[in-house]
Image (cartoon, grey):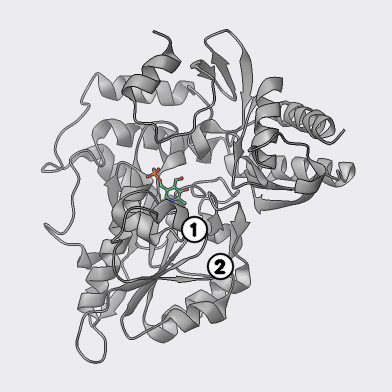
Amino acid sequence: MSVHDTFNQYVLPTYGRFPLIPEKAEGSWLWDDQGNKFLDFCTGIAVCSIGHCHPRLITAIQEQAGKLMHCSNLYEIPKQAELAKIIVEDFVKIPGKIFFSNSGAEANEGLIKLARKFGNAKPSTDGSPRHEVITFRNSFHGRTMATLTATGQDSIQEGFAPILPGINYALYNDLESVRAQITNKTAAILLEPIQGEGGIFSATAEFLNGLAELCKEHDLLLMFDEVQAGFGRLGNDMAWRAIAPDVQPDALSWAKGLGGGFPIGAFWVNDKDIDDGITLSSQLGPRTHGSTYGGSPLACAAALAVLAEIKEAKLNDNVIAREQQIRAALSEWNHPAILELRGKGLMLGFALNASAIKTSQGVTPALALVLKLTEKGMLTVPAGAETLRWLPALNVSEQDVAFALTLLKEALDELTA
Ligand code: PLP
């Protein structure tokens, strides 16, 4: 039975999959089972942050796997403590505490639970707990019941009613629409500094600063979902800081690039005082939250290797230089099929001119371009119907970016000819 037929018979058909069977990968390159080589600008959707099979990551995983792979969170796991300290001290740089999960959706579940706890500790004026969270249209926060509710896209919620009560949606980059959603039950605002799955739309500095002001005014938590954009992807250790460096968030979530391919998620909670010596981070105390696997010795060893590489190889600098290289090429081309390049760092969305791109029936312009690039030996991802997304490894070389640009230009020329 072929892989394709085995999939059809035994795996739930939840994904639209490309007919490509990956076999091995190294750095920014991936090979399929036929020996075809692809320049990988998908990276498992922003996961393989230091490239595929980085020697440092392999060594860290192998050494830890041979020593202690898993033990319960009933014990003090040294690598978990070390990773939490590095994230707080060297990356967030604001006093706070970390909880480790296995995925982005789980990390966001933690943020939503934190908002509820906070709303209990600081109730509304009538004494009832505040439980509402404002999220945004076009956002993406995950596929669990709470996070698909937080996700402001009808297509993702369809068929799963009743969804979680208490999530209200505002318009991204529109402060007035946020203000209109604030009630005496609102406890928090949750958003992506750059909307990823929704099509690569960046928040403006003005919007994030305005949200911080609103949160102060109404005693709300400001929570950033950095699952896709965190840890260097925007050319800064923290995604929100790449956009609005003066904002002080109350909580942050991550996953994807943190483990470089090994599953790990995390969320951070500010140690700030919320009430006369009571800290926000103390709201998630003993027995309020947990995970069997979260923060295992193996996952933490992997993340420690990734974060050390991000710092020591100065990957933020490479991300900024590669973004400049891409933007310079695009302004030189002035290609009729590209309307604009959205996003920041190496989380980039090419907004396509749908009327300029030839597609066959039922194929969106973004999908047509992804398929054309795959044919040419490059892996990319659509973000919505009319945006091509590039998420290369943070250490992608200048030569590989130059090659990617050549392939993109060829593909665009062929699709518009
Ligand atoms: N939040 C954001 C911003 C994401 O992009 C994603 C995944 O694409 C998630 C949350 C969900 O992460 P996971 O698939 O690890 O649950």
**Spot occupied by residue 179 in the image (x, y as percentages of width and height):** 49, 82
Q: Secondary structure at mark 1?
A: loop
Residue at image position (31%, 22%) is 10
Query: Are discs 1 and 2 less than 8 Å apart at CB?
Result: yes
Residue at image position (65%, 24%) is 374
The 10 Å Cα crowd at callout 1, few under 14, some 14 to 19, many 20 or more, is many
The 10 Å Cα crowd at callout 2, few under 14, some 14 to 19, many 20 or more, is many
Residue 228 located left or right of residue 351: left
Q: Secondary structure at mark 2?
A: loop
| Residue nearest the viewer, comparing 68 with 367 | 367
Tag 1: residue type? Ser
Q: Is residue 121 above or below residue 236?
A: below
Q: Residue furthest front?
A: 361
For disc 1, does the CB lie below 8 Å from ligand 1? yes
**Spot occupied by residue 342 in the image (x, y as percentages of width and height):** 69, 53
Q: Is residue 185 visible?
A: yes
Residue at image position (41%, 63%) is 94
Residue at the spot of label 2: 172
**Spot occupied by residue 171 in the image (x, y as percentages of width and height):** 54, 70
Disc number placed over residue 192 in the picture, else none: none
Q: Which quadrant holds residue 336?
A: top right
Q: Which quadrant holds residue 380?
A: top right
**Spot occupied by residue 67 in the image (x, y as percentages of width and height):** 22, 22
| Residue nearest the viewer, comparing 334 with 326 | 334
Count all numbered tags in the image, as a single digit.
2
| Residue nearest the viewer, comparing 192 with 363 | 363
Q: Is residue 377 visible?
A: no
- Please state, as top left, top right, bottom left or bottom right, where the N terminus lies in the image: top left
Tag 2: residue type? Tyr
Counting residues from the start of the chain, the first of labels 1 and 2 encountered is 1
Residue at image position (30%, 43%) is 82
Residue at the spot of label 1: 139
